[in-house]
Amino acid sequence: MNCRSEALEVSVEGRQVDEAMLALLHTILLHRSTGKFHYKKEGTYSIGTVGTQDIDCDFIDFSFVRVSSDELDRAIRKAVGEFKDAMGNGMDGMGQISLEFYQKKKSRWPFSDECIPWEVWSIKVNVVNLANEQERQICREKVGEKLGEKVINIVEVINRHEYLPKMPTQSEVDNVFDTSLKDVQPYLYKITFQITDTLGSSVSTTMRRLIKDTLAL
Amino acid sequence: MDSDLSPQDKKDLDKFIKFFALKTVQVIVQARLGEKVCTRSLSSPTGSDWFNLAIKDIPEVTHESKKALAGQLPGIERSMCVEISLKTSEGDSMELETWCLEMNEKCDRDIKVSYTVYNRMSLLLKSLLAITRVTPAYKLSRKQGHDYVILYRIYFGEVQLTGLGEGFQTVRVGVVGTPIGTITLSCAYRTNLAFMSTSGLKCTACKICHYMFSHFLPYPPYSPLRTAPIMGIIIDHFVERPFGNVGHMHPCIYRAPGEDEGAYNGVEDSQEVCTTSFSTSPPSQMGVPGKEGGVPQQVPVQPCHGAQAEHRRVSSCPPADHVPATPSSSGEDAETSSRSVGVKSGSPCGLLETTFTRKVGAFVNKPGTKVTTASLDLPFAAFAPRAYDLEENDPMVQPPESSATSSPLQGSLHSQGSGESGGPAQDDFVMVDFKPAFSKDDLLPMDLGTFYREFQNPPQLTSLTIDVSSQSMAEDLDALPEKLAVYEKNIDEFDAFVDTLQ
């Protein structure tokens, strides 16, 4: 199976990084989350209900919809916060944050489970520094428009209805979905990021963060 | 008809399409209410949340959708469309976008109805939630209120896009293949950038233009750095609406269930089973989907912002037979009422216009027992033309006993309105004591109203007045060399100043 890879690119001001990343990551996760599965006998299962919530950005003229799950929001914010810290404050720079959906394939002991990605979203971020309030105001609106275009791109990709993992049996559900949240059930995902300096030279830091501790050995 | 489709699958598919259409309309209209939408995730299914999404059902919207569908389903050459338009307080209206739910003949015969089609419809609704926040009408709808409202219209049949002006854009939300055709959901939205109104800020509609213009061209409007606006508004003051069905437009406003006069029985359908059970077994062993619907969920009351609860704002100002605000909107607080006054009295519809409600503005001290025209607590009363002989016939002045007063405040407001006398108003314009809202006039000699009147017409700044007699072009030219010499002398200072700006 080939992993589907999609790339998005945005240019934002320093203080807009958080919201821009949240907007795009939440839009993707909205489409890649279901309600909680409740397995019953005879191999049937029922699915919980996913609520949604409108979020207005403070530094961008933009609003987006995210899944109503504080746990999920906290996890994404944590990852975005780490990304922003790594990017540095108030400095021009480039970075890339990746949202990867994967399936786990159980391996025999002593080998650890294999994580097989089936969809990767890479968001390249260019951070610019603006000199005056007029430019910032223009940037507010421009970034809002750009994010709108990115949302349309995301929706377009998602609605191609390409590969999605098969719905798992009860014993396999943890190999496909993240079942640790109380209210919703996203596909297993991980968020990683890379930072490049302004010269675009070799990667100064490559950090891998596992947001959900899904591996247990 | 597809012979491969089992009767159960066909029945399920029809049900899915019907509820998908209804939910689509709900999502679109709720996204144009002007408020943020928030619904809770539930880990356990309730049996009434179609497509496993918490999308509330506004009964009025469901009723309108069913009326438009009239028992049919969206199908090939039978599209369901939701038209969103903007209407100003002066009656000008303009189509902003049209959402189309269509079906084409491309069939996917192998697809599983009760599983794949259902899940893809759920995905498409999520995409719709995302896309409805991205089109230009969303920002407009968030700012609706005094100057304009957003309306919706649902129709069935052929898609009409001519009202969107030239150069409209289309965004495709998504597609779902089914055994009987492919469902596509798309939006065509207006992008016309022309700013055609030339009468400045004199009218409400033009204030929208100015707002839009300034919103997208902030500092300053005509600086060389300005970027082209991403949208603008065409105000055609003198153009008839191309479609005669203005009466079918509905405001994107939510009324709490208690106020809907019991006219809508749309909740019955939410009792229908929605598939919430799936099977991981192969199709031949698929379990029976669905659960009993049970008691339908109560539609929770959404917060009604004052401006948005103003229903059925009149598009023009017919004399004397104007219908007052509906009882449901009278349930709002006084602030809303005074806002509606502000809107109506701002429209200069002529001397016979007496369509404002005389109500006390919020936080204003109630007037004394003897209420005359000279002491009307009407904001901007000085601008409201009135004719004496129409006051007695004006239903707004002596409103009929209303049984629909839903708050004691409203009751007291009506009693105030009915207590006033006519006053010596034979002239067209009556001098009334200007009492601005939110101000008290009993203590200080200089109150807000006096201050306002005194400084209403300030004199021109002396630096801006050009005394032509004292200067002439020749004199200006003569003074030039001296000025240039001074500037050259101080050139270093100027250069240093310019450097600090960079």
Image: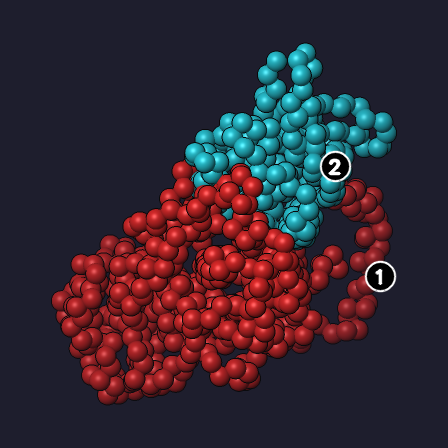
Task: Give the quadrant of residue B179.
Answer: bottom right
User: What's the residue at 31%, 64% (across, down)?
Assistant: B265
User: What's the residue at 20%, 75% (across, down)?
Assistant: B399
Residue furthest to the top:
A110
Residue for badge 2? A1
The colour with which the image depicts chain A is cyan
Chain letter, colour red: B
Residue A68 shows in the view = no
Q: Which mark is in front, 1 or 2? A: 2
Q: Distance between the residues labelled 1 and 2?
A: 81 Å
Q: How crowded is mark 1: few (under 14 residues within 10 Å), some or many (20 or more)?
A: few
Residue furthest to the left:
B369
User: What's the residue at 72%, 23% (across, down)?
Assistant: A207
Residue for badge 1? B481
User: What's the residue at 76%, 38% (across, down)?
Assistant: A2
Q: What element carries label 2?
A: loop
Q: What amino acid is found at the position of numbered circle 2 in the picture?
A: Met
Q: Say which of A106 and B85 sits in front.
A: A106
Residue B489 shows in the view = yes
